[in-house]
Image: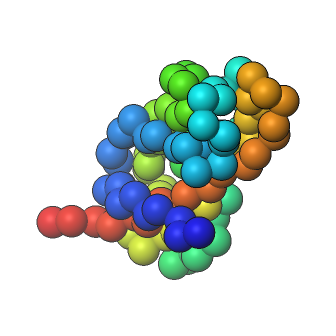
Amino acid sequence: MAIDTLVLQPGEKRLYDLPFTRLLRAGDNIQSVLSGPTSTLVEDPGGSAALTLSGTLIGGQVVQFNIEAGAGVLDGALYRIDAQVQSVNGDKPKAEGLLRIRDIK
């Protein structure tokens, strides 16, 4: 399954949707978030800082949260964003996405 890639600029804050649609059965919904959302730096252009993730909400088959690329997050950095949930039916899938930092001038 392809992983979606979101682009964020340094200093930008944006609402991010992490969908579980392809991972849950038809009619099933997210009951709770077991872990995350978390970010892991996978490509570092040279000392990039951590992202700030906040404000987690559950809506059907989607986990929503804010991502902020504050001071010290460098152009070209690539982060993996992931979370694990428990569904109403008891499934415990984990979804991930990629976030690329691009300084668009």
Q: Position of residue 32 (x, y in %)?
A: 73, 23
Q: Nearer the viewer, residue 101 or 91?
A: 91
Q: Position of residue 27 (x, y in %)?
A: 60, 29
Q: Position of residue 50 (x, y in %)?
A: 60, 52
Q: Nearer the viewer, residue 45 or 67?
A: 67
Residue at coordinates 74% horizontally, 35% vertically from top-left? Answer: 85
Residue 25 image-quadrant placement: top right
Residue at coordinates 67% horizontally, 59% vertically from top-left? Answer: 40
Q: Nearer the viewer, residue 44 or 62?
A: 62
Residue at coordinates 79% horizontally, 27% vertically from top-left? Answer: 89
Q: Residue furthest left?
A: 105
The answer to whether one can see residue 40 in this image is yes
Q: Residue furthest front?
A: 26
The quarter in which the C terminus is drawn is: bottom left
Residue at coordinates 35% horizontally, 60% vertically from top-left? Answer: 7
58, above or below 35, in the image: above
Give the left or right position of residue 66, taking residue 9 as reference. Answer: right
Q: Nearer the viewer, residue 44 or 40?
A: 40
The answer to whether one can see residue 74 in this image is no
Residue 15 image-quadrant placement: top left
87, above or below 95, in the image: above
Give the left or right position of residue 7, taking residue 93 as reference. Answer: left
